[in-house]
Image: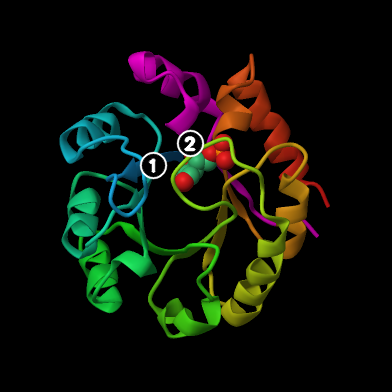
């Protein structure tokens, strides 16, 4: 059986001084661009403020998958949708009203997604599966690229897939995805793969995206 897979490169480990060129390298072969937003509060790292993120979203030619690792995310989530993100993902740990935040994102026409840190159980959030378009299961602690893939998160991916059942909800994994780990995540049930350092530390980022897609798509 083959199923649709998506490769969503993260620019976190790209060269920020020439970001537009870095994004252009992978755009022709990628499904979405994964844009990591960190506020130095929810995670101990900072990436882009809203203004810079909006600029990136505007010049990126492929759809943007904004991953918000920010505290008090309820209002800013909708603003990222209004700025033109195809998909906005927020952490359940950072929202005070999850349903309202999802509705805010979807009211703009964007896809809405919830993210779970490694210590957060999907069973506690299964009621929201009727409202979301994607679930992001973190396979590292959010904050930094280049960390080791947490294989023990695969059980959470399988549980999420079971809970989703027939609903057309994507399952994304983020953290440590590479040629060595992508098949493990696919076998557990993931269909949407973030890859940061695997792609941008590669001498040929576009070729790496293609290789990851082949591995993820082959069964
Ligand atoms: C980590 C970010 C990831 C990161 C992944 O908190 O959410 O998207 O860029 O980087 P790699 O693929 O290097 O683990
Ligand atoms: Zn991310």
Does residue 189 show up? no
Q: Position of residue 111 (x, y in %)?
A: 36, 59
Q: Is residue 128 left or right of residue 120?
A: left
The residue positioned farthest toward the right in the image shown: 219
Residue at (16, 35) in percent of width and height: 51
Q: Position of residue 12 (x, y in %)?
A: 44, 32
Scheme of colours in the image: rainbow
Q: Is residue 132 left or right of residue 205?
A: left
Q: Position of residue 170 (x, y in %)?
A: 54, 62
| Residue 77 falls within the magenta-colored stretch | no
Q: Residue under circle 2? A: 10
Residue at (81, 60) in percent of width and height: 1
Residue at (64, 73) in percent of width and height: 161
From the Cβ of disc 1, is ligand 2 less than 8 Å away? Answer: yes
- Who is closer to the viewer here, 143 or 192? 143
Q: Residue under circle 1? A: 36
- The reply to whether callout 1 and callout 2 are in contact (CB within 8 Å) is yes
């Amino acid at each position: 059986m083959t199923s649709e897979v998506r490769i969503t490169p993260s620019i976190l480990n790209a060269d920020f001084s020439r970001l537009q060129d870095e994004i252009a390298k992978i755009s022709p072969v990628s499904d979405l661009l994964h844009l990591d937003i960190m506020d130095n509060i929810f995670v101990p790292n900072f990436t882009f403020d809203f203004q810079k993120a909006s600029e990136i979203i505007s010049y990126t030619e492929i759809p943007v998958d904004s991953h918000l690792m920010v505290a008090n995310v309820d209002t800013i989530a909708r603003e990222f949708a209004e700025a033109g993100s195809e998909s906005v993902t927020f952490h359940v740990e950072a929202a005070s009203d999850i349903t309202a935040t999802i509705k805010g994102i979807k009211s703009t026409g964007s896809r809405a997604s919830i993210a779970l840190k490694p210590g957060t159980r999907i069973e506690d959030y299964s009621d929201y599966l009727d409202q979301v378009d994607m679930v992001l299961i973190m396979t590292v602690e959010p904050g930094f690229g280049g960390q080791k893939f947490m294989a023990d998160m695969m059980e959470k991916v399988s549980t999420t897939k079971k809970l989703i059942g027939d609903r057309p909800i994507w399952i994304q994994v983020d953290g440590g995805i590479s040629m060595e780990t992508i098949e493990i995540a696919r076998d557990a049930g993931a269909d949407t793969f973030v890859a940061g350092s695997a792609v941008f530390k590669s001498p040929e980022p576009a070729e790496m995206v293609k290789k990851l897609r082949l591995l993820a798509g082959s069964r």
